Image (spheres, rainbow, N blue to C red):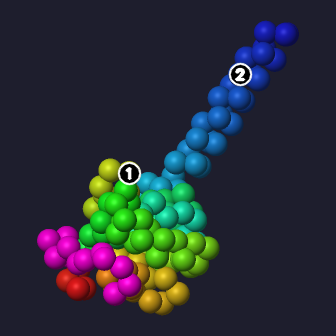
Amino acid sequence: MNLIIRIKFIIFFIFVAFHAFANNTSKTLPLSKSSNLTGIVTHVRDGDTIIIGAIPIRLAALNCPEKDTNKGKYATEIAKQFLGEMANCDLTGAKTYDRFVGYCSINGNDFGQFMMQNSSCKVWKKFDVMKKY
């Protein structure tokens, strides 16, 4: 009888672990295709990469200096003012490294346009797939 209880416990544990894993990973899978993502900006990596919730977003068509340069540090600081704000991103369906690529607005204002006007970030026409800039 003791063996049956152990087997049931192991099966139950495997079942719970599988569902916990499936629920955590399924949140990011639908974003692999073109879609829309809305959420709070929880982190800023640099001038052209923000994180919404736990999902990194590379701003489409935006090219900012690297954050280890003075201009890059400044662009990162400009972007950080949007921490905690609501962002809405139209994802292009592309992915670069661990980041989804998208055009984002924050509080209704185009984030890429704001960064180009207020820092040394520039439009990267080659990657402006939606021809916004």
Reply yes or no: does residue 119 show up in magenta: yes
Asked whether, in this view, residue 84 is left or right of residue 59, the answer is right
Q: CA distance from mark 1 to mark 2?
A: 34 Å
Residue topped by disc 1: 98
Looking at the rendering, in which quadrant would you find the C terminus?
Answer: bottom left
Residue 51 is at least partly visible in this image: yes
Question: Would you identify the image quadrant in which residue 68 lies?
Answer: bottom left
In the displayed structure, would residue 42 be above or below residue 123? above
Q: Is residue 25 left or right of residue 46?
A: right
Camera-side mark, 1 or 2? 1
In the displayed orientation, state which residue is furthest to the right: 1
What residue is at 73 percent from the left and 17 percent from the top?
7
Residue drawn at (54%, 63%) of the image:
43
Residue 129 in view, yes or no: no
Image point (38%, 84%), residue name:
118
Residue placed farthest to the left in the image? 126
Q: Can you tell which quarter of the image residue 2 is in?
A: top right
Label at residue 61:
none
Dot 2, crowdedness within 10 Å: few (<14), some or many (≥20)? few
Image: magenta residue range = 117-129
Q: Amino acid at mark 2?
A: Ile
Q: In this image, 7 relative to 108: left or right?
A: right
**SS category of the residue bearing label 1:** loop
- The numbered dot on residue 10 is 2
Work out which quarter of the rendered image holds the N terminus and state it: top right
From the top left corner, tell me how far across and down residue 23 is, in percent: 59, 49
Residue 109: quadrant of the picture: bottom left
Q: Is residue 6 left or right of residue 73?
A: right
Which numbered disc, 1 or 2, marks the residue that appears first in the sequence? 2
